[in-house]
Amino acid sequence: MLLEAPFTEAKIRALKVGEMVEITGLIYTGRDAVHKYLYDGGKPPIDLTDSIIYHCGPVVVREKDRWVVKAAGPTTSAREEPYQGPLMERFKIRGVIGKGGMGPKTLAACAKVGAVYLHAIGGAAQVLAERVTAVEGVHLFEEFGSPEAIWEFRVERFPVVVTMDSHGRSLHDEVLRASQAALARLG
């Protein structure tokens, strides 16, 4: 399924756990430093309304007069659990891309504001970088450095899977429960 910008609440609420999605449009990277900065009251340098945040510390190099993304793999999202839900609510963030899933606070925020968690494949940093067609800007670079900066990526058919939806489902929780039940049967 193709998910094209603008990433409206209606489009996001139509997504369900398990669906494969290809994102086309502008997304923003954000990791630990940015999440804490925003959580602590820092002003976002861009409008995050109806945005998708990518938990990614990309490898971006300057070639001639432009930035070029060499690697753009997801980072583990669980570190952002204390911040993500409140930030989704405050800034009306519609989606988060990462790996490993997130917890109950983020899942509750997804339902409340109409957002999703999108799982990107770890270990595919170069392949995912090929889906970044342009770097349209970088913010907080001086303050936090390259991997922690907010990068504006124009992406084309960026592949992800919906693993937490706005209807209260979490594939991560379902797999955990099924695994625990299987272990109990063995034990």
Image (tube, grey):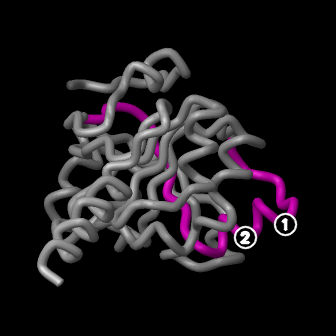
Q: In the shown orientation, is residue 52 left or right of residue 16?
A: right
- Residue 20, x across and y down, in percent: 20, 37
Mark 1: give few (<14), some (14-19) or many (20+) Cα within 10 Å: few
Instruction: Judge by depth and name the residue closer to the eye, 144 or 115.
Output: 115
**SS for dot 2:** helix
- Quarter holding the N terminus is top left
Q: Is residue 24 magenta?
A: yes
User: What is the span of residues highlighted in magenta in the rendered image?
Assistant: 22-46
**Which residue is found at the position 45% from the left and 26% from the top?**
12
**Which residue is found at the position 82% from the left and 54% from the top?**
43
Q: Amino acid at mark 1?
A: Asp
**Which residue is found at the position 44% from the left and 19% from the top?**
11
Q: Which mark is residue 36?
A: 2
Give how far apart the Cα atoms at labels 2 and 1 are. 6 Å
Q: Which residue is mark 1?
A: 40
Q: Which mark is residue 25?
A: none
